[in-house]
């Protein structure tokens, strides 16, 4: 392991950050923190044509929501800055020039339409056009021109790109911390564009130069960048720089395992793929986010951590501190990880039930205020939450399970009436109301005792009585233990519901 561990998360602000991107950031963070290293945020915004307003802010807000912190970056600063590539523009040209001088790169003046034509011709033969040793000798580039011609083009401002010259007929061997040794033949590679005449580097050049200048020790990124690795390795060699170590993380797959989980999948399949809600600045289209869907950030992070990494035992719940302690790259798998939206809910459920009743109650009180304009007493909310939290995954679901605590039933479930409301029910329920009215201490325990004795004394059926009573109190066959419900409702309200229910059902 190098002495100074320095890793970076290097998103391009071309849209909202996908959950796969968040996982990449998370693994970088866990790796840095578990090795006493530094975590850097670098914004890769050299491709101005793909720039999306608001995306950079969105990325930073998402990572902050997840609790992924940076030691250096756009907001944090640091001695390797600036950390936004558009602000580093002046740095890159010298490196492109250096590669031209050392014979590792060349100017290419080809017109887009000519290259498109070559691509089309190749396609017609079911082949792919590659700009490399097989074709470069016949194209409009500096390799086929004398110095005067090259100078003339540059002086006249002919648009150009600088291409990296992939060596002919070699095998490039790379080492990946997750995949091991990977070998690629150079004839399959393109002479990739490194720099354009508008003065902007492409991703490849800027990325390598910055990783070098920022002294990045480990490049941990998504598998989609594996095809770029041979070029990156060759670039390091051409510059004569020491390479960082590389780790390419497995893809996140759709729930059915068929293909990569894409930005489009989320709302189509009924779950978010973005950490926060995103509104497309052009179309106004809204994509849902984990935060707005009611996920706790620690549950989301816990779930993501286990999509590709495993602790080697069956522990599933990890705080960030525990993740930092347990994480290592050698427990990251090679194959894609299927995303399971139900499991994501399960994680949220686990974090929800771990919260104290008081804490959960205060979260729900806020929801009740904004969504229902209700401001119930805290003691009541704490009690309700303690009764129903096991039944829900999200704070917003508490209402579906507990609205009857706040609103007396206005209607009664027809199916339940058919099944549970008998000819004797009105009389029995009236007697029960009278009985409950005599109870001084209206607690669940006393209520239960009273009802139980009364049922026994009158040789009634527990099931028949309790189901009819539940129908009157709740309006349906749901809810926690009846004694608890009545204790929360209080004596007056419970009796009122019984009597008005009898009346309604008699009509
Ligand atoms: N800017 C690239 C991205 O958006 C970074 C890839 C890398 O980490 O090298 O994913």
Image: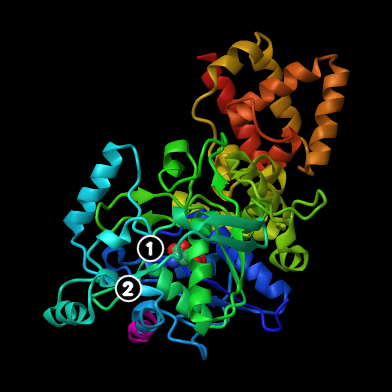
Horizontally, residue 141 falls left or right of residue 261, namely left
The location of residue 127, given as percent across then percent down, is 35, 41
Can residue 43 be seen from the camera position used here?
no
Percent position (x, y) of residue 410? Answer: 49, 29
Using the image, determine if residue 201 lies above or below residue 343: below
Q: Nearer the viewer, residue 105 or 241?
A: 105
User: What residue is rendered at 69% in x and 59% in y?
Assistant: 358
**Position of 281 compared to 114: left or right?**
right
Query: What residue did someone put label 1 on?
Result: 191
Residue at image point 60% right, 38% down:
401
Identify the residue at horizontal 72%, vertical 68% (top origin): 324
Q: Is residue 439 visible?
A: yes
Q: How many numbered marks have been drawn onto this rendered protein structure?
A: 2
From this viewpoint, which residue is outermost toward the top?
423
Q: Give the quadrant of the N terminus.
A: bottom right
Q: Closer to the camera, 383 or 505?
A: 383
Circle 1: is it few (<14), some (14-19), or many (20+) Cα within 10 Å?
many
- Which residues are drawn in magenta? 88-96
Rendered image quadrant of residue 474:
top right
Q: Within the magenta stretch, is there residue 92?
A: yes
Residue 10 lies, with reference to residue 437, above or below; the image says: below
Q: Which mark is residue 106?
A: 2
């Amino acid at each position: 392991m190098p002495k100074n561990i320095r890793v970076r998360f290097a998103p391009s602000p071309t849209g909202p950050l996908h959950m796969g991107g968040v996982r990449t950031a998370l693994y970088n963070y866990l790796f840095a923190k578990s090795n006493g290293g530094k975590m850097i945020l670098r914004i890769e915004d050299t491709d101005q044509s793909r720039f999306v307003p608001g995306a950079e802010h969105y990325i930073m807000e998402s990572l902050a929501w997840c609790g992924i912190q940076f030691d250096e970056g756009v907001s944090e600063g640091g001695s390797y800055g600036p950390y936004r590539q558009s602000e580093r523009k002046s740095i890159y040209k010298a490196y492109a020039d250096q590669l031209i001088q050392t014979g590792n790169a060349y100017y290419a003046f080809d017109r887009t339409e000519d290259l498109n034509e070559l691509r089309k011709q190749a396609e017609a033969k079911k082949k792919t056009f590659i700009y490399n040793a097989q074709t470069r000798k016949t194209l409009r580039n500096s390799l086929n021109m004398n110095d005067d011609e090259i100078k003339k083009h540059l002086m006249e401002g002919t648009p150009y790109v600088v291409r990296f010259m992939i060596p002919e007929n070699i095998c490039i061997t790379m080492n990946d911390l997750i995949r091991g040794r990977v070998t690629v033949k150079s004839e399959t590679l393109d002479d990739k564009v490194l720099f354009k005449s508008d003065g902007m580097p492409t991703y490849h050049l800027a990325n390598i130069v910055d990783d070098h200048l920022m002294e990045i020790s480990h490049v941990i990124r998504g598998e989609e960048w594996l095809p770029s690795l041979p070029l990156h390795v060759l670039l390091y060699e051409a510059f004569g720089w020491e390479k960082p170590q590389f780790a390419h993380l497995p893809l996140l797959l759709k729930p059915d395992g068929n293909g990569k989980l894409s930005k489009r999948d989320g709302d189509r399949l009924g779950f978010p793929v973005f950490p926060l809600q995103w509104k497309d600045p052009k179309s106004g289209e809204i994509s849902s986010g984990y935060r707005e869907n009611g996920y706790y950030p620690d549950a989301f992070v816990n779930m993501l951590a286990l999509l590709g990494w495993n602790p080697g035992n069956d522990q599933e719940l990890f705080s960030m501190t525990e993740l930092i302690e347990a994480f290592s790259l050698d427990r990251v798998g090679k194959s894609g990880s299927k995303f399971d939206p139900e499991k994501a809910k399960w994680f949220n459920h686990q974090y929800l039930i771990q919260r104290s009743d008081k804490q959960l109650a205060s979260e729900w009180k806020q929801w009740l205020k904004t969504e229902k304009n209700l401001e119930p007493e805290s003691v009541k909310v704490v009690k309700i939450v303690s009764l129903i939290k096991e039944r829900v995954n999200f704070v917003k679901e508490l209402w579906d399970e507990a609205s009857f605590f706040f609103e007396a039933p206005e209607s009664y479930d027809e199916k339940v009436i058919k099944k549970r409301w008998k000819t004797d029910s009105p009389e029995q329920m009236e007697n029960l109301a009278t009985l409950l009215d005599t109870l001084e201490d209206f607690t669940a325990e006393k209520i239960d005792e009273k009802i139980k004795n009364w049922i026994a004394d009158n040789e009634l059926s527990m099931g028949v009585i309790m189901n009819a009573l539940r129908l009157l109190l709740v309006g349906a066959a749901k809810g926690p233990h009846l004694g608890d419900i009545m204790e929360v409702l209080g004596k007056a309200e419970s009796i009122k519901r019984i009597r008005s229910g009898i009346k309604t059902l008699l009509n």
